[in-house]
Amino acid sequence: MHISKLSLINYRNFANARFEFGPGVNTVIGENGTGKTNLFRAIRLLLDENMLAAAYRLNEGDFHRGLGDWKGHWIIISVEFSEITMDESVQALFVHGTGNVHHAPVDKATFNLLFRPRKDIRVLLSAITKGDMSAMRAILDPLTIDDYETIFTGRSLADFNDPAVYTSIVGDFSKAIFADHVEFPALGASLPRQLAVAKEVSFSFIQALRDVVQDFQNNRANPLRALLRSKSGEVDAAAFKTITDRVLDLNRSIEEWPDVEAIRGDIKQTIKDAVGEAYSPSSLNIKSDLPDDADRLFQSLKLFVGEDGEDYEGGIHELSLGGANLIYLTLKLLEFKYQKSKQAVANFLLIEEPEAHIHTHIQKTLFDRLKYPDTQIIYSTHSTQISEVSKVDSMNIVGRENGRCEAFQPARGLDPKQIGRVQRYLDAVRSNLLFARSVLLVEGDAEEILVPVLVKKLLGVGLDELGISLINIRSTGFENVALLFHNDRIRKTCSIITDLDEAFIDTTPNADDGDSLARFKQRATRSEKAGAERKARLDAFASGNRWVSVFYADHTFEVDFLEAGNEVSATGVVDEIYVKAETRATAKESLSSSDSYRYGRRILSMAESAGKGWFAILLAGQIDEQVKVPGYILDALRFAHPTISNETWFNIINYRVALDEAASITSDADRESFLTSLDEFQRGGLTFAQIKVEFARVFWSDRINDVLERY
C-alpha cells in the first residue's frame, strides 16, 4: 500500500496542487519557499499519529493567501492510497473507513481532512438567493476561525483538484451562488478519530537537519532518547535486577562516603548554630539519586562519537555539523526500522532536505542506498546532487507560477524511452533546470560561457538573479530535455538557442575555387542543410507548446556576435591566439572587413584554432557594458523571462544611467531630469511603458534600448 496522490486545496501556499507518488522512493524537488515543508506537514496531518491534537485545529494563516478573503472557503487535504493489500484486517479498515468503493475488495482508498465552516453557517449560505452578494457578506463578514470545524472523511469520490467540483460543493463566492443543500455524498463518510489511518500505519518523519545539536539536548526531540525509551519498555525486570541492585549499592556507598557524611554533619550543625534546635529540620541527609529503574537508566545514556579517522570520542556538540547531522539521520532511520518491525499495514518515511551540511558524495550515496522493502519513502530536496540520482518518473517538482506554488510531474505522459533519455541528461549540472523559474537551452560551450556574460554586462543583473537557468545540452538534441516543459509536465518557459548555420558566402562550386575554398564551400553546404533540417524538426517539436520556443542564430553564435557590431571585442583576442605579427594584422583586418566571407571565416578559424570553449573565455574578457547582444538572444531572453518586476527594471535602468554618467554621453540637465522621472517610477508614479519612452528619448543610443523595446 502506498500514497498515489495528494491533493492540496487552499492550504498555505498551495491554491490547488496535485502530487503524484509511486511505490518505493519518491523525490519532491523545489527551490526555497515553494512549499516543500508545507507539503510534508499536510501528509503528517493525515498520517502522523505523533502530531499534537492542536495541529488539527487550523487557523487563518493556514489558508492560501491568494484567496484574499478566506471566510467561507474550505481547506482540503486529500490522500489517495493504491495497491491496498487483500489482508482481511486491511480490507476491513478501508471498506468501513476510507475505501472509495462500496464493495470489497478495494485496491484504492481515500482519506481526507476538511477544514470548513460549521453546518449552521453552510445551511445559511445554502438558503440565500443566487447572486445576493449583500446576503452572502452578511453571513461571511462576522465569521471567525471559531466558526470552523475539522473533519476526516473516507470513501470520497470527488476530484478536489477540479475547480468546478470545488465550486459545486463549497460555492462560488464571486457570484454568491451556493448549492441548496449541504450534504454531498462525493465527500465520503465522516470518520471518527479512533478509525484514523494514522493508527494503522508505521509513519516516521525526519525533519530538515538545521540544528541537530539542540535537538539532542531536547528530551522530547532527542532521537537517541526515543530509541532507548522503546527498548527500556522491553526489558525483563527480573533479568535487569542485577543492575538495579548494583545501582542501589552504589547509591549507598556514595551516601556513606566519609566526606559526604562530614558535609551532612556540618550542614546540620550550621543550621542549629543559625536558628537553634527548635527551628532546625528534624532530619537531613545527602542521597545519591542515580536511577534504579530501566527507563530512567536508559534515558541517562549519552552518545559519544569519533569523527572519521580520529581516535578521540566526543559528545554530539563536539562533532562537525555534517557529522552531527549524519548521526541524527542515522538514529531517526533506526527509529523507523524499529517502528516498521511492528507489522503495520503500510510503512511511510518522510525525509526533509537531508543534504544540509552533508558532503555531496554522502548525499548521493545516502539516496542510492536508502531503500526499505514494503516502504514508501518521500524526500524533499533542493540539492542538485540528490536530484541527479533521483528517478524522473518518481519525481514531483514544486515551483512558483503566476504568484502561487504548483506541483509538476516531469514524466507525465512520457513513454519509457523518452524517460530514459531525460534521465541520462540530468547530471548534477543539467538537473539545475529542475529548480529554475525559466530555462535557456544552448548547444555548446561558447553560448554557455558567453550568454551569461552578455546579460550581466548589458543589464547589470545576472541570469541567476532573474531566476533563469542556462543549460548546455552539448548537442542539438534539445528535444530530449525540452520535452519536460509542457502543459502536462513542467509549466515553465524554455527557450532553445541554436544555429541555423546558413552560409555567409555563395556556396555554388566554381572552377576557379582553390582546394581550401572548395572544401569550405562543401562544409558550409552540409552545415546549411543540417541547419535547415534542424529548424524544421525543432519548429515542429515546439509547435502548439506555449512553454517552448526556438531562437536561431542566422549563421553561428560567433559569426552573429561579430555581425551584431562587436568587432572591437573580437579583434581584442587576436593577439592571444596568433603569434606572428603579420597574421595578427591580417586577422584584425579581416574581422573589421565588410566582406562576410572574410570576417565570417576568420572568426570561425580563430574559434577552431583556440578551441570554442577557450575562445569564448578569451572573448568574455573583452566584453564590456557597451556590448551589442544579438537580437535572437534577446528574443530568447524575453520568451524565457517575459515579466520583469519594476524593482528589477529600476536597478537595470539605474545601472545604465550610471554608465552614461561615467562616459558623459548626455547632458547633465537631461540626466538630472530623467533621474527625477526614475525616482517617480520607483515610487509607482510612472508606469514601465512611460519610463521606457523617457529613457529612449534621453539615452537614445544606449544598448539597453534593444531590450526595453522587447518588453
Image (tube, helix red, strand yellow):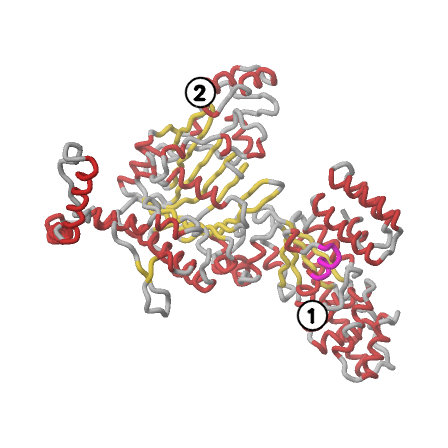
Residue named by callout 1: 617
Count the numbered circles shown: 2
Tell me which label, 2 or 1, sits earlier in the chain: 2
Front residue (pair 633, 105): 633
With 680 as the anchor, is 303 left or right in this view?
A: left
Q: What span is colored magenta in the figure?
A: 453-460
- Label 1 element class: helix
Main secondary-structure element of the magenta-colored stretch: helix
* Residue 616 vertical position relative to residue 213 in the rendered view, above or below: below
Question: What amino acid does circle 1 point to?
Answer: Ile
Front residue (pair 680, 149): 680
> Does the rendering let one see residue 688?
yes
Residue named by callout 2: 119
* Residue 311 vertical position relative to residue 292 in the rendered view, above or below: below
Asked if the residues shown at circle 2 and circle 1 are in contact, with their CB atoms under 8 angstroms apart, the answer is no
Q: Position of residue 301 (x, y in %)?
A: 26, 53
- Label 2 element class: helix
> Does the rendering let one see residue 643?
no
Question: What amino acid does circle 2 point to?
Answer: Lys
Front residue (pair 667, 138): 667
Which residue appears at 34% of the width and 53% of the height? Answer: 333
Q: Position of residue 201 (x, y in %)?
A: 32, 43
The residues tagged by marks 2 and 1 sit, at their Cα atoms, a distance apart of 68 Å
With 263 as the anchor, is 201 left or right in this view?
A: right
Q: Position of residue 649 (x, y in %)?
A: 73, 47
Which residue appears at 78% of the width and 53% of the height? Answer: 658
Mark in front: 2 vs 1: 1
Was residue 561 drawn as part of the magenta stretch in this picture?
no
Q: Position of residue 623 (x, y in %)?
A: 76, 65
Label 1: how many Cα within 10 Å (few below 14, some 14–19, many 20+): some
